[in-house]
Image (cartoon, grey):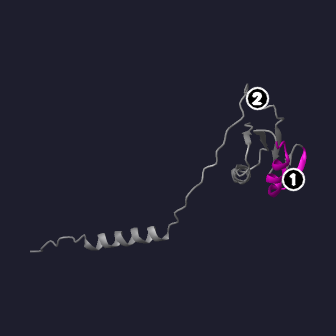
Amino acid sequence: MTRKRRLSLTSLIDVIFLLLLFFMLSSTFSRFAEVELSTASAGRIDNSGTKPSFLQVSPETLRINGRDIAIEVLPEIFADLSPDADTLPLIISLQDDVTAQRLTDILVVLRGIDRLSIRVLGS
């Protein structure tokens, strides 16, 4: 007569605990930042009276009002622009092959500039 042995779950619980501990210690907990984004909409009128600046973004270059610039000089350009205006409207146009990371990098730099009212043109 053969006797049935009971299956012990202790070793299974130990393995699950070790796997849980391993994955918790090896994973990276990142804190994602939010970038405020508003899109330009048809029929919206800007009442500030300040002429908007136009920023063209391509994968390699930036052009503001037709002038090639580097991303590092964006704060300097807007500091010199209309010092008496309450808000500075900025329209951003993206080429088709611009990545989301490139746009995010530019928006992070622009977020540090006071008085900017940013609009991103959609396709």
The mark found on residue 58 in the picture is none
Outermost residue, right side: 67
Vertical placement of residue 4 versus 34, above or below = below
**For the residue marked with disc 1, what is the amino acid?**
Ile
* N-terminal label among 1 and 2: 2
- Assess disc 1: are there few (<14), some (14-19) or many (≥20) residues with their C-alpha within 10 Å of its C-alpha: some
In this figure, which residue is indicated by the disc labeled 1? 69
The residue labelled by disc 2 is 47
Callout 1 secondary element:
strand
The residue type indicated by label 2 comes to: Asn
Question: What percent of the width, then of the height, locates residue 72?
Answer: 80, 58
Q: Nearer the viewer, residue 25 or 51?
A: 51
Of the 4 image quadrants, the one containing the C terminus is top right
- Return the residue found at the far left: 1
Q: Where is residue 80 shown, x and y percent of the image?
A: 85, 48
Magenta residues, start to end: 66-83
Q: Is residue 18 depicted above or below 50 in this figure? A: below
Quadrant showing the N terminus: bottom left
Single out the mark in the foreground, 1 or 2: 2
Quick one: 95 or 66, which is closer to the camera? 66
Residue at the image point whose x is 75% and y is 27% from the top:
45
- Does 19 lie within the magenta span? no
Quarter of the image where one finds residue 43: top right
Q: How far apart are marks 1 and 2 (CA)?
A: 28 Å
- The residue that appears at 75% across and 37% down in the rendered structure is 121
Q: Is residue 81 above or below residue 26?
A: above
The crowding category of the residue bearing disc 2, from other C-alpha atoms within 10 Å (few below 14, some 14 to 19, many at least 20), is few
The reply to whether dot 1 and dot 2 touch (C-beta < 8 Å) is no
